[in-house]
Amino acid sequence: MPKDRRGHAKLSKGVLEMKFMQRTKNRMRAEKEAEESRTMYEKDISKGMQNAVDKFIVEPSYVPIHNLIVGRVSYGGFNPEIEKFMTKPPVETEAVSREMEKEISDNEMTEFSSSLNNTMASKFNKNKKRKVAHFMKPED
């Protein structure tokens, strides 16, 4: 009987096709694909890359990012599971709780807003003096 790399006996195709062997078949297929991918990319992937830890956190929902409430709400004890979830205080991180620093000083902001007001006022000024085209009389 043929054996695989670990010394285990390989199961025949007919046995693997039987209904009760489907999990084993899927597991063996996954192992085979993993082995093939390892051999294919072993030159490109270093040991450090294989043991790398993710540096990013994937959040499946944007609800906690934007500090939104949960979409389901319950009142008067109709759904105790949801009410228990609603009573939990939202978790605040230090980055959110600390005060934001000013990027623009108050003086700069007042200068900007006053110049903007002047610009908009001049744009809508109805008493604008318009240039009138003067035609010169042709000389004979």
Image (cartoon, helix red, strand yellow):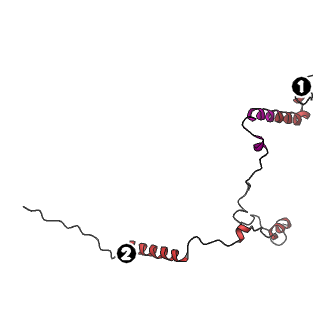
Lateral position of residue 42 relative to residue 115, left or right: right
- Quadrant the C terminus occupies: bottom left
The answer to which of 115 and 64 lies nearer the viewer is 115
Residue 6 image-quadrant placement: top right
At x 79%, y 70%, the residue is 89
The residue where tag 2 is placed is 125
Tell me which segment is drawn in magenta.
Answer: 32-53
In terms of secondary structure, where does tag 1 sit? loop
Pinpoint residue 58: horizontal percent, then vertical percent: 73, 54
Q: Give amino acid for label 2.
A: Asn
Residue 32 image-quadrant placement: top right
Lateral position of residue 15 relative to residue 116, left or right: right
Lateral position of residue 32 relative to residue 103, left or right: right
Name the residue at the top extreme. Answer: 1
Pinpoint residue 137: horizontal percent, then vertical percent: 13, 65
What label sits on residue 12 in the rendered view?
1
At x 67%, y 73%, the residue is 99
Count of numbered labels shown in the rendering: 2
In terms of secondary structure, where does tag 2 sit? loop
Residue 84 lies within the magenta run: no
Q: Give amino acid for label 1.
A: Ser
